[in-house]
Amino acid sequence: MNKSAIRAFGIALFLVGALLSVAERFDLNIGLPTVASSTNQKVEELQKKLTEATNELTALKAQSPIDTTPEKTQEEKPADTTADSEHAANDSDSGSTTDSSNEVTMTLQIYSGITPYIVAQKLEDGGIIPNSVEMELLLANAKYARSLQIGSYEVNSSMTLEQIAKLITGKKQ
């Protein structure tokens, strides 16, 4: 083998390596088999499972006779005092209590690193607010952004979103 043939072979190997690196860097398909095809199959499979789980959850919700909204439980509750005390005892276990005026009270725990989404979800789950998205958007507002104060707060359903936001961010009322 002569010197020029070896040099040409080396240059060819360098160019092929450079071409493969550029193709990988910019996600170019140059005719080589890729891992993306198996990844796409996995994504499709997981989407099918998610759809099935969503359908199953919807079916279970339709079968469930229990409505967990606080307004419904107040309307369906009998007027005798034993039911009132049992209902209040059940609510106090979950961290919220109900007065006779449909007012729900709960203790909201704010910890380091909590997001406005989690705060809004806790308030909605506790029956304090009807829509967590509104609260999340309010807390994401520049006026309250990044100012959630760590601690425990007593909140109730008679408070407005603005009052709750001022309470948990330490803003003056």
Image: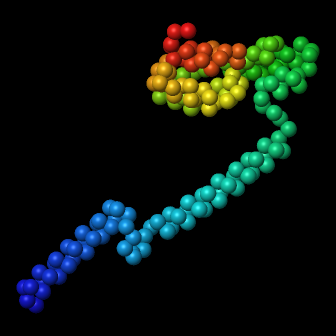
In the rendered image, the residue lying farthest to the top is: 173
Task: Give the image location of residue 50, x and y in percent.
Answer: 65, 54
Q: Is residue 126 visible?
A: no
Q: Which residue is found at the position 60% from the left and 15% from the top?
A: 163
Q: Quadrant of residue 29?
A: bottom left
* Colour convention: rainbow
Q: Nearer the viewer, residue 123 or 165?
A: 165
Task: Give the image location of residue 97, x and y in percent.
Answer: 74, 17
Q: Which residue is found at the position 55% from the left and 62% from the top?
A: 42
Q: Nearer the viewer, residue 17 or 107?
A: 17
Q: Quadrant of residue 20?
A: bottom left
Q: Which residue is found at the position 54% from the left and 28% from the top?
A: 116
* For residue 39, side relative to residue 94 (left or right): left
Task: Give the image location of residue 85, x and y in percent.
Answer: 83, 15
Query: Exactly how many numbered labels are in the figure?
Result: 0
Question: Is 87 above or below relative to 134?
Answer: above
Q: Nearer the viewer, residue 125 or 162?
A: 162
> Could you tell me which quadrant the N terminus lies in?
bottom left
Q: Quadrant of residue 100?
A: top right
In the rendered image, the residue lying farthest to the front is: 142
Q: Which residue is found at the position 11% from the left and 81% from the top?
A: 7
Q: Is residue 136 visible?
A: yes
Task: Give the image location of residue 38, x and y in percent.
Answer: 51, 67
> Could you tell me which quadrant the C terminus lies in?
top right
